[in-house]
Image: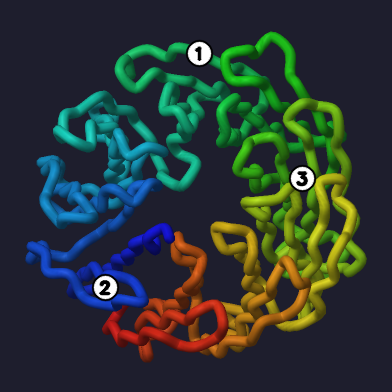
Amino acid sequence: MAARQHTQFAYRAQKEMGVWDAPPTSAALALDKPASEVRALKYSPNGKYLAWATAAEVRVMDAQTQAVVATIARAGVLDVRFSPKGTYVVTWERFSKPADGEASPNLSIWDAKTGALCGAFVHKSFGEDAIQWTDDEKYCAKLVAGEVRFYAPEALDQPALVLRVDGMSSFSVSPGRSPSVAVFVPERGSKPALLRMYTVGSFTRPTANKTFFKAENVEFYWHRLGTNLLVLTQTDVDNSGRSYYGESSLYFMAAAGNFDCRVVLDREGPIHDVAWNPDEKEFAVVYGYMPAKAALFNHRAEPVLDLGTAPRNLVRFNPHGRVLALAGLGNLAGAIDLWDRKSKSKICTIDAHGASLCAWAPDGRYLMAATLSPRLRVDNGIRIWHYTGAMVFRQPIDEL
């Protein structure tokens, strides 16, 4: 029998950080914690490294041995991220521009093992899409002056590839072995919004095109293989006056360009969340005015399973795609329904009142929920449940 996957989690609070072996062990790990406030904390996607940033430096730790692998003497770092394989660390400091000169580079890429600087850029704001990587780490990409520039990480001084599309406001690089890039041009006046997909490295002709109205900004949801894309379009204002959050629609696009459609939803109201099943070509959507409806759709955007109506605003598949969590977090009551995808039946309902975050463990057996500051100043902490509904861990943490 194969050994059970070892899992771990880390947290940062206003006055401390901590690293724990996850259930079923549930033990705090001894490590050399920084004396000052931890501003950012991030695992590499493969779980090999854990990085944290203080006001004075960034440290990269081997998650298994808790040994410090590299120390980056960079002050003022506010966020830290890893490349897909954990080879590189990306750091970001607040943008500032002197009155009498050019802005200094504030987004830097470092070698995770040595802490050596690979290159740096000027970047005003930082988010999940600031620097995007292909899964093989052959390229990292960023949006600069209306064009997507692809850089080889070993040669960051000049872009290796450039994709130009007039009016482009955002882009997304797909996962998978043959990566695509999707670019979005918002609607202007009477012209509809435009979304195009290209194969990375082949920008002469797009592989897919889609136009739509009522789209000022979008969110991209790729299937893990990079073969299909869900595009959530949004407007800032709902002209009907029924929603404070504007209008939203969902579109399905195949990267090969052989199929696209609008996902037809049978309830009016906002689209709260979307998630792909990582193991199947199907996706879940939570939509409509509260109480919201949740449903599963197949790879042709056809509904295949009604998951009921309840006050829910978040959906998460576990990493194996077998169990689905439907949660009502934030301003909702905190109930989380767990569904068995194979039997198409509800397993249990978890009471995670006060939680504003939930996430599956990498082994797919445990679900974590956290109550975070500053949304709530009391009862901050972490709770973990087995997928059968039994609570197996609870740890209060001040100002989490």
Q: Which residue is mark 3?
A: 215
Please give the residue where the numbered disc 1 appears in the rendered image: 161
- Label 2, on which residue? 13
**Front one among 19 and 362:** 362
The structure residue drawn at horizontal position 31% and vertical position 85%, both measured from the top left corner, is: 395
Query: Could you tell which of marks 1 and 2 lies nearer the N-terminus?
Result: 2
At a point 45% along the width and 74% down the height, the residue shown is 368
> x, y percentage for residue 315?
65, 67
* Residue at figure coordinates x 88%, y 59% from the top left: 303
Q: Could you tell me residue 58's position as x and y percent? A: 17, 48
Which picture quadrant has residue 190? top right
Q: Quadrant of the C terminus?
A: bottom left
Tag 2: amino acid: Ala
Along the polypeptide, which appears first: circle 3 or circle 2?
A: 2
Q: Relative to the observer, which residue lies in front, 252 or 238?
A: 252
| Gap between marks 3 and 1 measured at Cα | 28 Å
Q: Secondary structure at mark 1?
A: strand
Q: Residues within 10 Å of mark 2 (few under 14, many from 20)?
A: some
Q: Is residue 38 left or right of residue 146?
A: left
Residue 248's tag is: none
**Nearer the viewer's eye, disc 3 or disc 1?**
1
Q: Is label 3 or label 2 in front?
A: 2
Of the numbered discs 3 and 1, the one sitting upstream in the chain is 1
Q: Is residue 231 left or right of residue 111?
A: right
The answer to whether 117 appears left or right of 71 in the picture is right
The 10 Å Cα crowd at callout 3, few under 14, some 14 to 19, many 20 or more, is many
Instruction: Choose top left, top right, bottom left or bottom right for residue 230.
Output: top right
Cα–Cα span, label 3 and label 2: 37 Å
